[in-house]
Each structure stands twice: as structure tokens, then as C-alpha cells.
Amino acid sequence: MKKIFRIVSILEGVSYLLLLFIATPIKYILGNEIFVKMLGMPHGLLFIVYIILAIMLKYELGWETKKFFIILMASVIPFGTFYVDKKYLRA
């Protein structure tokens, strides 16, 4: 389960960065929404799966509330999921 969470974490982080730093500027600078539409749904699904897996792993691995909160907050901070992977998931 932890390995699956690591994969989802990395995919969610990459999709968030692509959406934030590529698709959104293209939308507002060039007026082309296609990339936001293409990346929005996969990112949303990965975000939901990330949260669900985090909740499941909280109980499976016995994460403290503080650690769990940091892991959840990392999903809305750019590069946050990569920090979680390095600090909490590798081992």
C-alpha cells in the first residue's frame, strides 16, 4: 500500500506542477484552455486517490496527527508531495 501511495504521490505532484506552471499560464497568456481541460481531470482524480490513500495509511502505519496533517497539506503546496515522499515514504 505504501508503494502505491508513493506512486500516486509522485503522479499527483507532477500533474499539479504541470497544471500550475504550464497549463494555467497558457490559458491566461495565450487564451487556450485545452491544457487545463486535459490535465484538470487526471489531477483531480489523483488528488482524491492521494487523500484516500493517506487516510488509509494513517491507520495502517499509525501516523501521528501532525504527520498526517503535513502529508495532507503537502497535496496543495507545489512540490509538497515530493517532500512527503523524501521525508516520510522512503524507508
Image (cartoon, grey):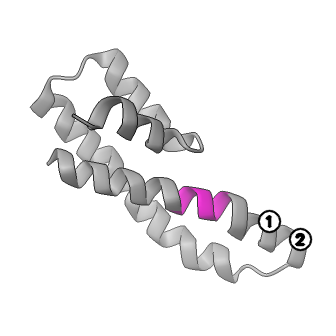
Identify the residue at horizontal 27%, vertical 47% (top origin).
52
Name the amino acid, label 1.
Pro
Image position of 62 (left or right of 42): left
Nearer to me, 9 or 91: 91
Magenta residues?
15-20
Q: Count the marks: how many?
A: 2
Q: Is residue 1 above or below residue 61?
A: below
Q: Residue pushed farthest right? A: 29
Queried whether the magenta region covers residue 39, the answer comes back as no
Label 2, secondary structure: give it: helix
Image position of 75 (left or right of 26): left
Residue 83 - label? none
Name the amino acid, label 2.
Ile
Nearer to me, 52 or 13: 13
Residue 54 drawn at (x, y percent): 28, 40
Q: Residue pushed farthest left? A: 60
